[in-house]
Image (tube, rainbow, N blue to C red):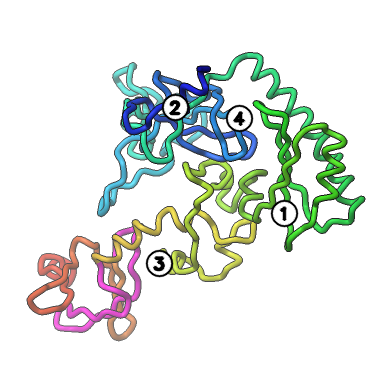
Amino acid sequence: MDKRSQRTSRSSSDEYAYVYYIKNPSYNDVSLGAWDSILYSGTPVMYETRFGLDLGLIVGPMGVAGRPYQPGWSEVRGACLHFGDEKEEDDVRYSQDDSQHQCDSCFCCQIAKEPEKMKVSGDVSWIDHLATPAEMARYAENEEKEEYALRICREKIRKHGLNMKLVTTHFMLAEPKVVFFFTAEERVDFRDLVKDLSGVFRMRIELRQIGDRDESKLIGGLSVCGRDYCCHAMTGAGSDRKSSVTIKMAKNQNLSLNSMKISGPCGKLLCCLAYENEYYLEEKAGCPPEGTRIRIDRELWKVTEVNILSRKISLAASEGRTISVPFDEIWYNDETGYWEVSEEYQEEYFS
């Protein structure tokens, strides 16, 4: 029995191993793979993809870097705070203890998690083997051939007058097969195109129709925030089963409902709307909804805005007066059935 057969014949329910995120550099799929020893980020491996055995790169061990998100936890980590110029970075790079890096104590930094063995189950499959130098050399050769394949395929598409847009192509590493990714507004009959391409490349041809969001995922680019597309740079495992992004998520986050302002270059709603939606819902569940009236200092005030980022609630009274009250100073009285502002805050604010 060869090594691959041994891997696939393993019973996942009885195996403990290190589980890693693996990303395919050609079509940006991310999946989970198990291996019986520690692997480092960037290690090339051969693993089973939806198109067959192919090359992938280890992204990192499974699990959330640093402290995982807990429902109700307001201290969510973000981008690194140390974004100054090189001189500033040199000035603050190390603390008094020269062995401690500035990011060790940075609230926003993501601290890498050490791999730990865990039970292999679910969608986790075994890595077939570590990529050999010969396989890496063949992968580099395939990348050079892909430009030629794109040019030939586009010529054949024009020849047959097909209404389709070729996005990219990929030569499989472990078998003689080339995959062409394309977009089209309607179903395309590409049987004659496949015959022509088979005659040119003398291998198995697969044409895969993808959507607009998948096109952005394959090609990449810069979004309105100045960063790489989320779908291209940081898509999680199981990306083929993406959860839907809805306009209601933008409403939950008090964003503009103008579709032009909350849509990506692909024309679809921004993927990042879904990332923080759960956190906003949890925070808003503990706050009075907009329009709620709260009695403060013998006067009714109306909630006009719930700002999750500043953790403050804006209220307005008569004559255009407004105040901002921190979340911690507003609570729901179960006995009276009304929202109330703490007496300490009222005394401090209105004294």
| Residue at image point 44% right, 27% down | 9
Residue at position x 59%, y 61% in the image: 268
**Mark 3 or 4 closer to N-term?**
4
Q: Is tag 3's residue or tag 1's residue first in the polypeptide sequence?
A: 1
- Label 4 or label 1, whichever lies nearer to me, is 4
Q: How many residues crowd around disc 1 within 10 Å: few (fewer than 14), some, or many (20 or more)?
A: some
Residue 294, x across and y down, in percent: 21, 78
The amino acid sitting under disc 4 is: Asp
Type of the residue with mark 2: Ser
- On residue 9, the disc is 2
Is the C-beta separation of discs 4 and 1 under 8 Å? no
Residue at which label 3 appears: 252
Residue located 12% across and 73% down the image: 333
- Taking 9 as reference, is 251 above or below it? below
What is the magenta range?
287-312
Distance in Å between CA atoms under marks 1 and 2: 37 Å
Q: In this view, does 253 lie to the left or right of 313?
A: right
Amino acid type indicated by mark 1: Thr
In this orientation, which residue lies closer to the viewer: 131 or 213? 131
Question: Seen in the image, is 252 located left or right of residue 265?
Answer: left
Nearest to the eye among marks 1 and 2: give it: 2
Please give left or right for residue 72 compared with residue 111 in the image: left
